[in-house]
Every structure is written in structure tokens, then in C-alpha cells.
Amino acid sequence: KGKEGVLVNVTLPSRAELAQAGSVGRIVLDMALGCEGPLDETCAVWDRVVTLAACCSRQDGGGVGGGVGGNCSEFELGRWITPFRRGVGRWLTDVSPLGGLLLQPDAQSRCSLRMTTDWWASAWYPSLSLRFEAAASPSAEQRAQDGRKVSPAGAGAGAGSAGADPSSRREAEAGVESWGPSASATLLFRGGKFGPDYNNNRTVRISPPPGATRAALYAVITGHGSDNNGCGEFCPTEHVFRFAGTNVSVAYADAGDFWGSTFTVAEGTIPSQHGTWQFGRDGWFDGNKVRAFTAGVTDLVVAGGGGAPVEVRYWGLYKGQTPHPTTSPGVIIMWSWVAWW
């Protein structure tokens, strides 16, 4: 509660120390929410976004990961949505693709972790553990999530959208979640007001770091607010990332579905909440963690590139077009990266 949220300073082991302990397989956030008292009636009534921001530097004074992590600006490490007045909920979030912003190969890292929600809202009482685990095979649920989140070839290409060649779309490379913590990560795009200017100035050029052999897109995207189209909370949106002419995209078709959230109870959504919890939302569900969209892009940014810069473009679309609401636009909250191994 409050503008400062909850702040904790921690020292993280080096990759070498984790490897020696056999715990360098993946990095997991273990987060739970509690209320002021033991009964649900003491819990906050409304659903809110909860964010975990991190800022890391070398214990010996240097930067971590370069770019955003290197100058110790805060970046989002995790995102959750609180339930409607339920005092239960515990979620595991694999954040291994952001490992390059947390860990150093040969030195410990000094990190500040800050958890916040809307400062004016009723308080939640979070607990968080940062877990370093041995390598594990991707679960069936993880594989199903990756497959469900990738939009089919040919979706959403039209005037003002991602271009006239829908056949260039591709599905995500499987198994990214088994690659372990990344070596570094490059920030691509953030979100913003989901209106007619949303897709302006959405081009960057990136280069693979020396020694990189794998790369993946890692994007955490949620829609909030409500314009005349129900965007961004209740409208299905599509998000297209074009790497050197090839599109990688994700579409959130559950938004606005009356029973959309009920189908995700087995994936962590808290059941039997108050309010309108059962509706599907744009990239999120009440009382659950926000899952990242991941897609292997090695062949697009590393393989055969010789370290040459690659152009990356991004579009956020509603019904295949740049949004043009007639009322105040909603908001897309997004952190998108290319993670390097």
C-alpha cells in the first residue's frame, strides 16, 4: 500500500556459485497474497495490478546485463492480478529469460526488489521468494500455454496493421522455458494509451551480443481501462513483432468471454471470487499471475547474422487494425524483450 510499496534489498549469488550448487536451471518467483485478517471480508474488494520491479548491479560496483539493468533503472520482473476479495492465492512464475538482468557470471549481484499496486487502493500483504532451481523439463501446462497463445498464420493483416503479407507469420519455437536463465536481455517496447497513436515510432534495431547462440522474444502484455470498444480490459487484442520481415504474434481471444477465467482455474486462477471474476480479460485473469508470451527467434536475429543489426517493429491491434476509439482510450501495460543465451 502507498506509493513506495514494499522494498527489499537482496544479494544474489553469481552464476558460478549457482552452478556449483546445481541450481542454475531456472529462476522462479514464488508469490502469495494475504489480507489484513484471516477472513475474506478483510480483503480488498477490487482487482488490482501488482508489479514487482527490480534494479540490480554487481556487488563489486559494476552493472548487470547492460542496457536497462546496467544503469540500474528499475524493470518489471513480475506481474499479478489480485482476486476479488479472496484471501488465498500462491503462484510460481518462471522469469528465467530475464536472468541476464539479475545475475553475473563471476560476481554476486546487489538487487532492490519493489512490489507495488495502486497506491490509493486497499492494502494487500504479499510474500515473495526468489527460487533458483535445477533444470526441469517443461510441463504439459507450459507447453499448452505456449501453443494456445500463438495466433494462427494469416490473422489480423489489414490496412494500418502489420502489413499485407500474413503468410510471413510463424509459430513460437518450442522449449524456450527449458533454456534456463538468459545471459542478457535487450529491451524492445513498452505499452501506452491504446489509441490512434499507439503504433507510432515502434521500430528499433538490435544486435546480438558477442557469443550469443540463442534468442527468444519475452513479452508480458495486459490491457486495462474501457473505451467504447471495451479496450483494453475486455477487448481481444493482437500484438505483432516483426523481426527482419518475419512476424511473431500473440492474440488474446479470451477477453470479454463470459466464462473465460473459469477455464483457467487449473492454471492458477482463484475460483469463486466476488465480482465479475469469471470474465476473460485482455492477457490476464483475476486472481492469477500474468504469463509471459515467449517465442524462440534464434533464426531471425542470431543464426547466420554475424552480429549484424536486425530491425524489429511492433504493432498492437484491435480487430486487425490500429485502434481508433471514440472515447478515452484504455491502456496496454507491456514490457517486451529479446533474451539472449
Image (cartoon, rainbow, N blue to C red):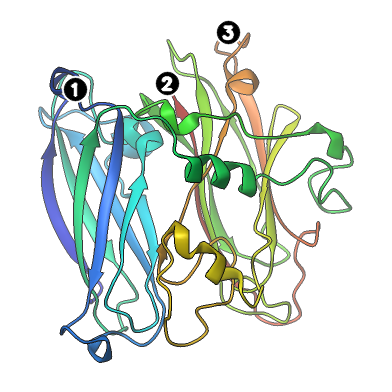
Inspect this view and state whether residue 200 appears: no
Label 1 element class: loop
The vertical placement of 53 against 308, above or below, is below
Q: Are marks 3 and 2 in contact (CB under 8 Å)?
A: no
The vertical placement of 176 against 117, above or below, is above
Q: As shown in the figure, which amino acid type bears the numbered disc 3? A: Gly
Q: Nearer the viewer, residue 204 or 118?
A: 118
Q: Residue at x 12, y 50 (%)?
A: 9
Residue 292 image offset from top left, x and y in percent? 49, 48
Residue 163 image offset from top left, x and y in percent? 84, 42
Determine the image quadrant of residue 198. bottom right
Q: Residue at x 25, y 73 (%)?
A: 3
Q: Which mark is residue 341?
A: 2
Label 3 element class: loop
Marks 2 and 1, the one that precedes in the sequence: 1
Q: As shown in the figure, which amino acid type bears the numbered disc 1? A: Gly
Q: Which residue is mark 1?
A: 22
Q: Which residue is mark 3?
A: 306
Label 2 element class: loop
Q: Cα distance, mark 2 to mark 1?
A: 18 Å
Q: Nearer the viewer, residue 276 or 227?
A: 276
Determine the image quadrant of residue 106. top left
Residue 6 image offset from top left, x and y in percent? 18, 65
Q: Nearer the viewer, residue 184 or 233?
A: 233
Q: Nearer the viewer, residue 255 or 341?
A: 255
In front of the other: label 2 or label 1? 1
Marks 1 and 3, the one that precedes in the sequence: 1
Quadrant in which the C terminus appears: top left
In front of the other: label 1 or label 3? 1
Q: As shown in the figure, which amino acid type bears the numbered disc 2? A: Trp
Quadrant in which the N terminus appears: bottom left
